Image: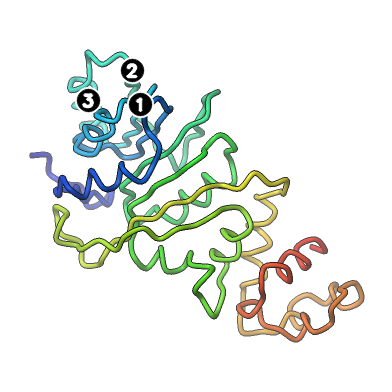
Amino acid sequence: MHIPKKSLGQNFLLDRNLRKKIVSNINIKNKNIIEIGSGTGLLTNEIIKQNPKKLILLEKDNSLYEKLKLKYLDNKSIEIENIDVLKDNLSFKNNFNIIANLPYNISTKLIIKLLIKYKNFKEMVFLVQKEVSDKFKYKLLNKKNKYSLFLEIVSNYQVLHDISNKVFYPKPKVKSTLIKITPKNIEIDKEKLWIFSNKIFMNKRKKINNKFNRFNNRIIDKKILEKRPEDLNKSEYLELFNLF
């Protein structure tokens, strides 16, 4: 068995029933699929059974990349790339759905990057740290954060299942959650929106009028200025963004 590398946040999913559950939550048959962090190919095998049109495996670990090339040498519908998805740009012409058991240390950064930079992802199913999934829950959070408001604008977000840490090797200290993100087809500068979200949530306990003086004479509803960023709703957040 491949020895997991702690530096890459590798935790391999041992439970076959859970792997089947993951692939059941995304359209695969005759679709173009990207799997990020394919590891030893355990989840990959379940994807293949659903007959994707094309399957691209992205693996940063050099030794796992070489093993994947040998394992799927005779499968002409599979393309394997040895890249770091956080640093490298993904180039493809077709629409893709994404599946990934994401390392905890890159999950939020990678999800934000995918939402900002690419328009040709239709559905994305990720296994992430439960703490990450909780940050994204814009429908249930009383207090918002820079992630939840951003995701509410640019995507539809679903929590599918909480996952025990017992189904991984090595066993992580925290629980995981299976989530689904469906990007919205909207005309908005997502990169600028993310910059805005970061800025407005700096010193999140400060009221808006103490953070951005330039809004004072331009905003329609002055009550917004008395709010803290964590108390904003979607429409108020967008109103501020349009003046940013």
Q: Which residue is mark 1?
A: 52
Q: Which residue sits at x=47%, y=32%?
A: 96
Identity of the amino acid at label 2? Ser
Picture coordinates of residue 14, whole percent (x, y): 14, 48
Crowding around mark 3 (Cα neighbors within 10 Å: few <14, some 14 to 19, many 20+) is some
Crowding around mark 1 (Cα neighbors within 10 Å: few <14, some 14 to 19, many 20+) is some
Q: Which residue is mark 3?
A: 66
Which type of secondary structure does the marked residue at label 3 adopt?
helix
Q: Is residue 97 left or right of residue 206?
A: left
Query: Vertically, is 128 above or below 232?
Result: above
Q: Which residue is mark 2?
A: 77
Picture coordinates of residue 21, whole percent (x, y): 26, 48
Identity of the amino acid at label 3? Glu
Which type of secondary structure does the marked residue at label 1 adopt?
loop
Quadrant hosting residue 20:
top left
Crowding around mark 2 (Cα neighbors within 10 Å: few <14, some 14 to 19, many 20+) is some
Disc 2 from disc 1: Cα separation: 8 Å
Which type of secondary structure does the marked residue at label 2 adopt?
loop
Query: Vertically, is 219 above or below 156?
Result: below
Q: Earlier in the sequence, mark 3 or mark 2?
A: 3
Picture coordinates of residue 65, whole percent (x, y): 26, 29
Identity of the amino acid at label 1? Pro
Mark whose residue sits in front, 2 or 1: 1
Image marks 2 and 1: residues in contact by CB distance under 8 Å: yes
Q: Which residue sits at x=22%, y=45%?
A: 19
Disc 3 from disc 2: Cα separation: 17 Å
Residues 242 and 20: in front is 20
Disc 1 from disc 3: Cα separation: 22 Å
Residues 176 and 169: in front is 176
Q: Is residue 167 left or right of residue 30?
A: left
Q: Earlier in the sequence, mark 1 or mark 3?
A: 1
Q: Which residue sits at x=52%, y=38%?
A: 121
